[in-house]
Image (cartoon, helix red, strand yellow):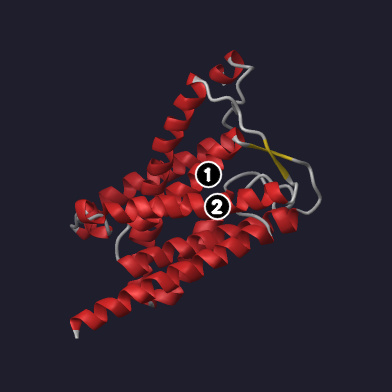
Amino acid sequence: MFAYSKNPEVNLKPFTFSKILSRTATVILFIALIWFRKQIDKKNIRSLGLENFSGKKVQLGKGFLAGILSLGLVVAVKVFWGVSTWSPKTLGFPELLLSFYFLGAVFCIGFVEELFFRGYLLQSWITELGEKKAALYTSLFFSGTHFIRPISDPLVLVPEFIGLFLVGYALSLAWIYTRSLYLSIGIHAGWVYVVKMQSFFVDPIPHDMHWVFGGDRLVTGITSWFFMFAFLWFLKKSFEKTIRTENTKAI
């Protein structure tokens, strides 16, 4: 709030109570998970899918680029159809500093959320329910936890819930295909980075086609759902080819 009041020329947004509550809950879950793994499971936190970083860092980078490209296409479509306007801002030192801050922040967000949702929750449910049901339940829970805030009209949040479910399902598949968290962390970070950085390049235009193009959040609306389905298809086809190649070499 202090930074917001002292910098009226910069488009800063003060944190609401619900935002602080959501972030605090995430940090508490993260700390509780580390304690639980060490004290109860007697396992290292790296066993959740963080082994061999030197060998898997390429997955992290590819995931980040894939996340930026896929959600960047949603922004491009909105600009093409006139529900957003291309208006890149002048990037001075404060804006560049903020962009680097966002870059670090999105990887922190991706790491913490993926460690809990795909590292612990998904893997625990796979043991009990199998991969398909575990991916479904984890994605529903992932989507639901993003609504820790006051809700005046629940129907307005339906498109966002669907979009976040598809996001969660794609991230769950990323772990299932790689048995590692690095790809899902990279994808997650790339998507959040586009969300954070879009205001530097585009301005929204008021419109009534929210079910088609969504609102303030990029994962809402039929357009983003289409790209999410395309991303799921691309992910599935990419790793099916990799698996077939590995099986052929094994034979």
Q: Is residue 124 in sight in this rendering?
A: no
Q: Label 1 sits on what residue type?
A: Val
Along the line of sight, the residue nearer the viewer: 33 or 229: 229
Residue drawn at (63%, 49%) of the image: 76
Residue drawn at (66%, 59%) of the image: 223
Check whether the beta carbons of the residues at disc 2 and disc 1 lie within 8 A of each other.
yes
Q: Image height check: is 156 above or below 203?
A: below
Disc ID at residue 251: none
- Where's residue 92, x and y in %? 52, 21
Q: Secondary structure at mark 1?
A: helix
Residue named by callout 2: 71
Residue drawn at (36%, 75%) of the image: 241
Along the line of sight, the residue nearer the viewer: 160 or 52: 52
- Where's residue 17, x and y in %? 57, 34
Q: Image height check: is 61 above or below 100?
A: below
Disc ID at residue 194: 1
Residue located farthest toward the bottom when viewing the structure as drawn: 251
Q: Is residue 2 in sight in this rendering?
A: yes
Marked residue nearer the N-terminal end (2 or 1): 2
Query: What whole-number distance in Å separates the C-alpha atoms at marks 2 and 1?
Result: 7 Å
Image position of 103 (left or right of 89): left
Residue located farthest toward the top when viewing the structure as drawn: 6
Image position of 136 (left or right of 27): right
The C terminus sits in image quarter: bottom left
- Where's residue 146, x and y in %? 55, 51
